[in-house]
Amino acid sequence: MRSTTARPGIAWRRKTLTNQKINPKIGFLKSCIGIQMTTKYPSIEAVALRLAVLLKRTGKTRARVSDKTLRILSGRTTLRDAFVINMRSVLEEYGVVAVRLDRGGFALIATSALEGAPPALVKNLMPDFKRLTEEELWNELELPDDEVNE
């Protein structure tokens, strides 16, 4: 018969498992030593709603929001790309477009403000678009070299 004392950790785990409920979200070890993880982030929908209301309360159709403001509203210390992409998608459902700015932060624009924008018609502005090469288009756009993703 094998003794459980050969591996002292096993006996301790068995005893702990029988005496304490394990929270599967925080894992065995953290449950055993009593660490509780209370960092629950607000949902992406809640953060997007907060931003939409923030824009509405400004009384303007556009506003600039810093990364710090977004971190405060979202309860996050790091703004991951996946979070930002999902948040922008939800914001569009709420009638707000979020654009990342070069100097940091985001521009929030109400889509209702874009309803009255003048149309850009290809027949008036680019009647010869079929003859233009990509190089000519890039030159006309005049982007700095560090902004072109090739």
Image (cartoon, grey):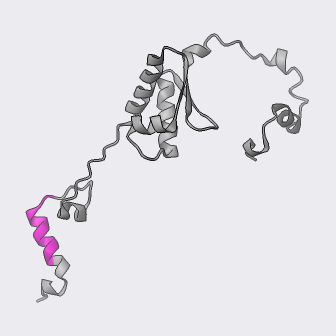
Q: Is residue 107 above or below residue 104?
A: above
Q: Is residue 99 magenta?
A: no
Left or right of residue 69: residue 4: left
62 vs 40, left or right, is right
Residue at 19% from the left image edge and 64% from the top image edge: 33
Most extreme residue toward the top is 116
- Image x and y of residue 5, in percent: 13, 85
Q: Main secondary structure of the magenta part?
A: helix
View extreme (bottom): residue? 1
* Count of marks placed on residues: 0
The residue positioned 19% from the left and 78% from the top of the image is 9
Q: Nearer the viewer, residue 118 or 35?
A: 35
Residue range (magenta): 11-21
Residue 75, above or below 131: below
Residue 12 sits in quarter: bottom left
Q: Is residue 30 left or right of residue 121?
A: left
Where residue 50 appears, as percent x and y from the top left, is: 40, 27
Q: Could you say where residue 143 lies in the image, as x and y percent from the top left?
A: 78, 37
| 14 part of magenta stretch | yes
Residue 115 on image: x %, y %: 61, 12
Residue extending farthest left: 19
What residue is rendered at 11% in x and 89% in y? 1
Q: Quadrant of residue 74?
A: top left
Residue lying at 88% horizontally and 35% vertically, measured from the top left: 136
Q: Is residue 93 above or below residue 1?
A: above
